[in-house]
Image: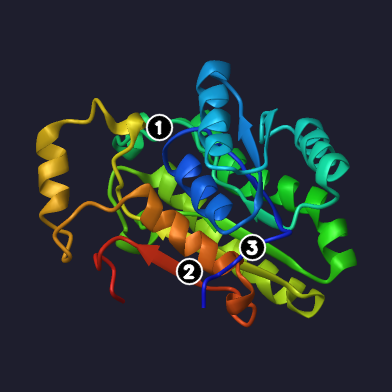
Amino acid sequence: MSYLLENKVSLITGSTRGLGLGIAECLADGGSKIALNYHGNREVAEQAREKLQAKGAHVMLIRADVTDKFQVSSMVEAVEEKWGSVDILVPNATGPQPQKPIEEYDADFYREMYEFFVLSPFLLTQSALPGMKKRKWGRIINITSEVYHASVPQFTAYVAAKGGQIGWSRSLSVELASSGITVNTVAPGWIPTDRHINDPQEDKDAYLHTIPMGRWGTAEDVGSAVRFFASDEAGFITGQTLCVNGGRTPW
């Protein structure tokens, strides 16, 4: 079994760096065409596209705010116009993730977390769903986090939104099962990427000590899990969460 994705089209949000780019690379390695999404840094986005194209992948690059209904709709339409479908949808984009006591959060930040992790997957799915239903085939793979399972303190806004994303995915998986569409989630642990470059070394050392496998996870580890869920081999698996964290949450 090789989890091939030939003739499939993948749209991954927040995919021009970090985990998102790692996911895009793994799906491209499986033969999928790749729609990269970004919102801010065009230069970084172009570098990501060039990296995938150098490996022989078919790539398109789309700028869109994934919390904006009209931009999301336009993005999906652009992919469908170029390649005819969005077969594999991976909501991955994220915003700031500060850890602080509950007293220091405000309602606006809670809303921002909701918009990234519940509203955005909803908007993306609504836009891509007609094509998936027409073809009786689709994969929706939400990138969540171990924080929901590990009950991380001083992270309530992020944990609440990720819990909502997992619950939403489970409900949707049952709703779409008869349409040949699976909905699963991949929940990474703390995997250092460029966004973590300024994190305190003592925090990194302490976390690494809690990983039973004794090593850091990589973007490829996460991408491989996504590629599995995207494959035909995973066609009878839906509504599940796969924690990619070296054994930190074995329950």
Q: Earlier in the sequence, mark 3 or mark 1?
A: 3
Q: Earlier in the sequence, mark 2 or mark 1?
A: 1
Helix, strand or loop status at disc 2: strand
225 to the left or right of 155: right
Residue at point 32%, 54% (across, down): 189
The amino acid on which the numbered mark 2 sits, given as a three-letter code, is: Thr
Asked whether residue 247 appears in the rendered view, the answer is yes
Q: Which residue is mark 1?
A: 105
Of badges 2 and 1, the one in the foreground is 2
Q: Which residue is mark 3?
A: 5
Helix, strand or loop status at disc 1: loop
**Front-most of 6 and 45?**
6
- Distance from disc 3 to disc 1, alpha carbons, whole Å, reads 42 Å
Question: How far across and how far down the image is residue 98, in percent?
Answer: 35, 33
Question: How far across and how far down the image is residue 94, in percent?
Answer: 51, 37
Residue at point 50%, 42% (across, down): 20
Mark 3 crowdedness (10 Å alpha carbons): few <14, some 14-19, many ≥20: many
- Distance from disc 2 to disc 1, alpha carbons, whole Å, reads 28 Å
Asked whether residue 145 appears in the rendered view, the answer is no
Residue 19, above or below 31: above
Q: Which residue is mark 2?
A: 241
Mark 2 crowdedness (10 Å alpha carbons): few <14, some 14-19, many ≥20: many
Residue at point 54%, 38% (across, down): 52
The amino acid on which the numbered mark 3 sits, given as a three-letter code, is: Leu
Identify the image quadrant of residue 145: bottom left
Residue 181, above or below 160: below
225 to the left or right of 214: right
Q: Earlier in the sequence, mark 2 or mark 3?
A: 3
The amino acid on which the numbered mark 1 sits, given as a three-letter code, is: Tyr
